[in-house]
Image (cartoon, rainbow, N blue to C red):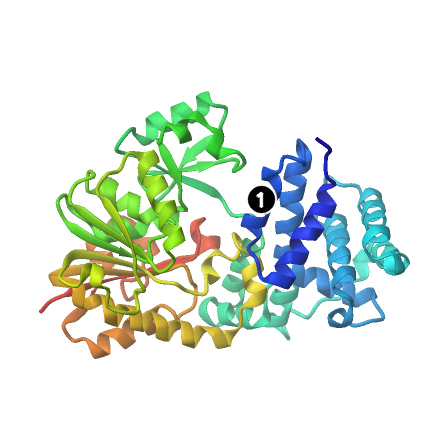
Amino acid sequence: MSSKNPRRAAFEILLRIEKEKSFADILIDHELSKDMIKGADRGLLTELVYGVLRRQGTLDHIIGQFSTQRTDKLELYVLLLLRLGLYQCFFLDRVPVSAAVNETVKLAKELAPRASGFINAILRNADRNRDNISYPDRAENPVGYLAVRYSHPAWLTKQWCDQLGVDGAEELAAAMSEPPPFTIRVNTLRTSREALMARLTEEGINCSATRWSPDGVRLNQSGLISRLPSFRDGLFTVQDESSQLAPLFLSPEKGDRVLDACAAPGGKTTQIAQLMGDTGEIYACDVNHKKLRLIKETCDRLGITTVRTFTMDANAPSPAIKDVTFQRILVDAPCSGLGVIRRNPEGKWSKSPDDLLPQARTQVSILENLCKYLDKQGTLVYATCSTSVQENEYVVDTFLREHPEFVAEDLRTLFPEFAPLFTERGFFRSWPHRDGMDGFFAARLNKIK
């Protein structure tokens, strides 16, 4: 079988993301599954796609310094080729600048021949004058500085500055531009963390225990994990450390009946089952019936039997649970995903601040619908992977104003071992730059009457 140029493949993926708003991880997995990209080129493809998406704002700023034509007026093919070339020149140390320029120009002659000379000139001029590139002044325009230097939308860096101050926002912006850690969760129904780490070491994987999650393991690599014998044996599943904490705050007990709303792809569902010793009943629902297959596959691989899946729009009553109530409900609400943009960097360029209020209204609506399925004295955990106050504290406060039968519990009192991760109001909020995991939020609500 013939091989494929990883740079051309990266270009094609970036083009589809721009045109179709597709997801980078799905497109990369699909391309690699064809097995037409071999060896180190597989890693190069992944690096180019994610790298360009993470650094897109900075790359466009550099283009604007040397192009006589405004960046937003460039043909899409030309813009993508320039981003690919400049990313290799400025951010990829293992690729010589000469090779980055030559390979990009070669690709341009195939894809945009009339612009190949223009692309060549921009790349070489940017390389020669890299020390003269100007950036917004940090003191006078901190929002613009962080946006350009660390490649994030300015509306988002402003939000971070308001939440964390300029210094904290810069630490967060820097962390959000880097690849995220790769974390798994041990299947405690079959093994222990110590035994799994020993097994992974035997399989040639360097790993270390996570700081906060008692069942988390951080790996030094993410490729081909599904081919490991320990994965096939159901000894672990992939799940970020921040995501592993929300089920702990739910505190499910053996024999409970639990609803996991918006459950796909099933990481928290299976963790709840583990915490319950695979006893009781777990109802896992999602609005997308195709995603339910992912939950079932994970349960089968991990040997979990107490989960039943069904399609449900969490916004509306469901006949599947019309006469059912639950001791525990986990609402991992659909959100902007601002806390995981280093994993899904394409998302930060397609979002706007205008998206947040409609999203928050949907989240409140979900809580309004699901709260009636909770038993008296039952526990509901509301969680998102967003850094936005509007999708988190605002949603909780809005819900509590309309539902005096609920109170927000102080997680600092209930889980003192996690105290540094909680806000002054007793909510869970993790920050990538501070805690080494995704940006996550969780509030624990109790139905008192």
Residue 159 rendering spot, x and y as whole percentages: 49, 71
In the image, taking residue 257 as reference, residue 290 lies left or right, namely right
In the image, taking residue 357 as reference, residue 126 lies left or right, namely right
Residue located farthest toward the top when viewing the structure as drawn:
202
The quarter holding residue 430 reads bottom left
Residue located beneath label 1 in the image: 30
Q: Locate the N terminus and report the quarter of the image it occupies.
A: top right
Residue in the picture at 69% in, 52% down = 12
Instruction: Give SS at disc 1.
Output: helix
Residue in the picture at 16% in, 41% down = 279
| Mark 1 crowdedness (10 Å alpha carbons): few <14, some 14-19, many ≥20 | few
The quarter holding residue 360 reads bottom left
Residue in the picture at 84% in, 51% down = 110
Residue 328 rendering spot, x and y as whole percentages: 18, 56
In the image, taking residue 357 as reference, residue 74 lies left or right, namely right
Q: Amino acid at mark 1?
A: His
Q: Is residue 118 visible?
A: no
Query: Which of the two residues, 144 or 121, is positioned nearer the viewer here?
Result: 121
Query: Which of the two residues, 412 or 365, is positioned nearer the viewer here?
Result: 365
The quarter holding residue 425 reads bottom left
241 w.r.t. 325: above or below: above
Q: Locate the C terminus and report the quarter of the image it occupies.
A: bottom left
Residue 214 rendering spot, x and y as whole percentages: 31, 40
Residue in the picture at 58% in, 62% down = 21
Please count the marks in the image: 1
